[in-house]
Image: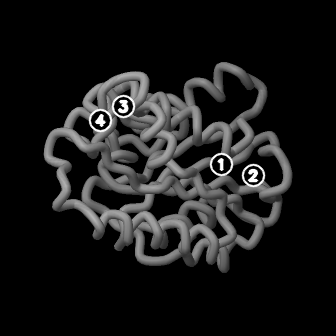
Amino acid sequence: MTDDISRRDFLAATATLAAGSQLPIGAIANPAQAAPAKGTVIVFQGDSITDSGRNRESADPNAAGALGNGYPLLVASAVLAARPASEFRFYNRGISGNKVPDDETRKALPRVHLIVLEPFVLRTGAVDARWFPEFDQRRAAAARVATHARATFVPLQSIFDQRVRTAPAAYWAADGVHPTPAGHAVIAAEWRRAARL
């Protein structure tokens, strides 16, 4: 974490992300141009895909239950195993059903590195033609938010469209929306690539 912000300030600022357009967001308290520094705080925000059944009773960093059962846990596990001296602190603040209307974190923390994961769906389960073109508009909105916030954008739809060529859509997201363990692993790998972790 950078010297000019406290953990409390960082968490308070990232909490402003949690309120109107299903955007899983990761925020890293460091300049976007550099690899994360020792002691960096990493916060995941988003909806049910980010929440992944996390234990809201635990506020401790790096606690398995507090990170949930999805991509935040996989990211934290891999990074902490690869960098034991990093003193990184991972928090999951995803809330099932939450939406993100805009991004005020950049104003509060100008040096923060934001990562916006594009919403995605796969044509299986509940997802059929009725989801489109509205869903494509949401994806475009996510890209605009990332551009406006100077965030790193991860194009999950095209990534999963490629994955569907190697295994059926239900292998990656059984209901077409919520990732399976394999789907979460894909998201975690792409998130780590975007964060340079």
**Res. 138 image quadrant:** bottom left
In this figure, which residue is indicated by the disc labeled 1?
41
> What residue is shown with label 2?
1
For the residues carrying marks 4 and 1, which lies nearer the camera in this image? 4
Query: Label 3 amino acid?
Result: Asn
- Per the model, the C-alpha gap separating discs 2 and 4 is 34 Å
Considering the numbered disc 1 on the image, is that residue within a helix, a strand or a loop? strand
Q: Which residue is mark 3?
A: 69
3 and 4 marks in contact (CB < 8 Å)? no
Which element type, helix, strand or loop, lies under badge 3?
A: loop
Which mark is in front, 2 or 3? 3
Residue wearing tag 4: 173
Residue in view at x 47 percent, y 69 percent: 140
Residue at 58 percent across and 38 percent down: it is 190
Q: Residues within 10 Å of mark 1 (few under 14, many from 20)?
A: many
The reply to whether dot 1 and dot 2 touch (C-beta < 8 Å) is yes
Measured in 3D between alpha carbons, the distance from the residue under mark 3 to the one under mark 4, in whole angstroms, is 14 Å
Type of amino acid at the residue the image marks with label 2: Met
How far is mark 1 from mark 2, CA to CA?
A: 6 Å
Amino acid beneath label 1: Val
**What kind of element bears circle 2?**
loop
Which is more N-terminal, label 4 or label 2?
2
Residue at 63% across / 60% down in the picture?
114
Q: Residue 56, percent across and down?
A: 33, 46
Report the Cα–Cα distance between label 1 and label 3: 20 Å
At label 4, the amino acid type is Ala
